[in-house]
Image (cartoon, helix red, strand yellow):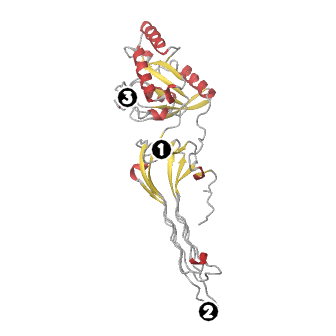
Amino acid sequence: MKFLDEAKVYIRSGDGGAGAVSFRREKFIEFGGPDGGDGGRGGDVWVEAVNGLNTLIDFRYQQHFKGQTGTHGMGRNRTGSNGASVTLKVPVGTQIFEEDNETLICDLTVEGQKFRLAKGGNGGFGNAYFKSSTNQAPDWANPGLEGEEKTIWLRLKLIADAGLVGLPNAGKSTFLATCTRARPKIANYPFTTLHPNLGVATVDGREFVLADIPGLIEGAHEGVGLGDRFLGHVERTRVLLHLVSAQEEKVGKAYKTVRHELEAYGEVLTEKPEIVALSQIDVLDEKELKKKARELEKACGKPIFLISAATHLGMQDVLRALRDIITEATPPLKEPPPPAGAEDFDDDGNDGDDEDK
């Protein structure tokens, strides 16, 4: 399955049905009267976070979603049926933006969370509604109200506990494949990883989710290489694991290059706890290893881990360190307070409408 983390979609809720103009014509009833029914409501457009999805690829093949128009009212006080609503199924962690791609509509971080993106138009009143003591034979009815239409952007930010960052060929995909059942593409050339990968790691009976993103290079925030467009997938993590390859000639410079790109992206990443590890140490002799370890510790200003995914050296130690930070960290994945239009959030399957026309 191809990975797609952004999609542009057009939505339109259904129009309300028109009210009916009708009068009773029944044998043996001395006085007739208006009996036109009301029109039905148009269908809404909802978005729902569901389990089992990790890409927005479905929205590449369908970009238009429309609610059904409500049925018109009929005589004998028959009310038209409501139009069927349509629901966009998206992965957990999807954000919905207005057409400007900046104004946030909602952030779906919990499985089953729903939000109404467009409300269907109300049905029009039939002429029976307008009957009164002074107007006993109204010969008009209301048309249904039009539905809402808009263009929106869907942006996926994967939900994981820990994120892997580093230069290309730092060993991130190998690390993920070693400690989880994920099977990312692994090869000895830059940008082997072209899209984020997720895996579930287990240490001492505790499970947590790891996210691996394509490598960063100098100038990524300006669009160099694959750019920093995938950094959004580690925004929700509680800790970052920064891998620096022991094959780098200057490991301190390699560390600072990635940190600079994280700082250019924003404080949301630079403020996260960070664990630094020198990876692929099985390719170095003891003397060279000590030299590069000291250089990396000086660059990051804290103790580092020495690991080799190929030989499993140091893997359990770094996984336990990640687990401890994840356990102690305040869970950031609480359901955020809804923005304007809070009544459009659906917690119990009802949209809160009272069917008033």
**Dot 3, how many residues are within 10 Å of its Cα: few (below 14), some (14-19), or many (20+)?**
many
In the image, what residue occupies the spot 61% across and 81% down? 135
Label 3 with label 2: CB-CB less than 8 Å:
no
Q: Which mark is residue 198?
A: none
Q: Judging from the image, what secondary structure is the residue with disc 3 in?
A: helix
**Dot 1, how many residues are within 10 Å of its Cα: few (below 14), some (14-19), or many (20+)?**
few
Q: Is residue 65 above or below residue 73?
A: above
Q: Residue furthest front?
A: 134
In the image, what residue occupies the spot 61% across and 28% down? 329
Q: Is residue 296 above or below residue 223?
A: above
**Dot 2, how many residues are within 10 Å of its Cα: few (below 14), some (14-19), or many (20+)?**
few
Marks 1/2: CA–CA distance: 61 Å
Marks 3/2: CA–CA distance: 82 Å
Amino acid type, label 3: Ala
Q: Which residue is mark 1?
A: 103
Return the residue nearer the eye: 275 or 22.
Answer: 22
Q: Which residue is mark 2?
A: 27
Return the residue nearer the eye: 54 or 264.
Answer: 264
Q: Which residue is mark 3?
A: 220
Point out residue 193 in the picture as x, y percentages from the top left corner. 39, 32
Q: Is residue 323 above or below residue 128?
A: above
Q: Is residue 89 above or below residue 330?
A: below
Q: Residue furthest top?
A: 287
Mark before the other along the chain sequence, 1 or 2: 2
As drawn, is 341 to the left or to the right of 101? Answer: right
Q: Quadrant of residue 229?
A: top left
Return the residue nearer the eye: 296 or 46.
Answer: 46
Point out residue 345 in the picture as x, y percentages from the top left corner. 59, 50
Q: Judging from the image, what secondary structure is the residue with disc 2 in?
A: loop
Point out residue 109 in the picture as x, y percentages from the top left corner. 56, 42
